[in-house]
Image (cartoon, helix red, strand yellow):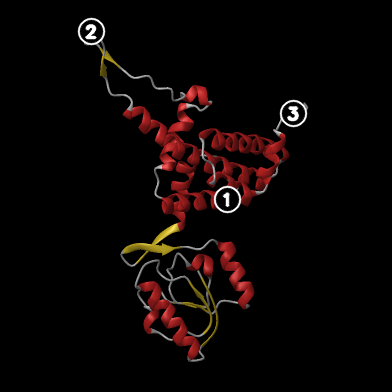
Amino acid sequence: MARAAISIPRNSARLVHYDAACREIEFCRTQDEAKGIRDRAEAIRIYARQLKNKRLEIDAAEIRIRAERRWAELHEPLKARGAAAGGQKTGPRGHFIRPRDDSPTLAEMGISKEVSARAHKIADLPTEIYKEKLAAWREVVEQENERVTTNLLKIGDEAQKHVRGTFGTSENDWYTPKEYVERARKVMGGIDLDPATTEFGQATVCADEFFTPIENGLEREWRGRVWLNPPYSQPDVSLFVSKLLAEYQAGRVGACVGN
């Protein structure tokens, strides 16, 4: 059976250029602009799935997520304006009259209640948390053959449970995706030492020698080619960087890639 043809707006082709699309979203000043990008991205996502072009499908899905978040950010001022205008006024006979609100409804904007609710939840996330979830979502759909979905909140939460661990007693250890570790291994020709790691992390890094918090890498000598992903908090980051410089100046460390 032949596949049904999908009509994609001519100007949607620019969304193939991922970076340009991200910038376009940032500069959106109206909900219509954000929704226009969202709709074009969704059309491309469907088209890419039919073509089995997963990279394009993922890019388009991410652009849709970003555009929906921007749409929700632009929707907040309208909601606030509507609430401010919602105060009751007294009519000629003492009857309460609600001022007219000309803000378009979700149906008029072509947005479902489900999409609106999800977009507002994403918009409410602090910027750093939003970026973390987006990165985790992308890693899952790229590396684990996950079906490409735009449900950032669900898949992002699940992904973070797998990529985020603990170092000591606080949540400050972030495990690096395997592809980046392998790139570092290729550049240095191997990894002799990981001085700030966990047993779990070594399943990916596979250094010849490693120090966990129990061994305390800050109190030991470092040698050879080092992979350094220090605890993600202060003063730990500064302490590990200072230790690296000292070991390099002492001639014990010949190369290092950090994260």
Looking at the rendered structure, the number of numbered marks drawn on it comes to 3
**Pair 1/2: label in front:** 2
Residue in the foreground of this view, choosing between 136 and 82: 82
> Does the rendering let one see residue 78?
yes
Residue position marked by numbered label 2 in the rendering: 93
Residue 25 image position (x, y, % from top left): 55, 44
Q: Amino acid at mark 3?
A: Ala
Q: In this orientation, which residue lies closer to the viewer: 54 or 121?
A: 121
Mark 1–mark 2 contact, CB under 8 Å? no
Amino acid residing under circle 1: Glu
In whole angstroms, how far apart are the C-alphas of marks 3 and 1?
30 Å
**Above or below — where is 166 with respect to 241?**
above
Relative image position of residue 204 (x, y in whole percent) = 53, 65
Q: Which residue is denoted by mark 1 in the rendering?
A: 144
Placement of 251 over or under 208, stated as above or below: below
Q: Secondary structure at mark 2?
A: loop
Residue 161 seen from this side: no
Q: Secondary structure at mark 1?
A: loop
Residue 180 marker: none
State which tag comes first along the sequence, 3 or 1: 3
The residue that mark 3 highlights is 5
Q: Is residue 36 above or below residue 63?
A: above
Pair 3/1: label in front: 3
Q: Residue 57 in the image: state x and y as whole percent.
A: 64, 43
Residue 5, quarter of picture: top right
Amino acid type at image mark 2:
Arg
Residue occupying image coordinates x 62% and y 38%: 41
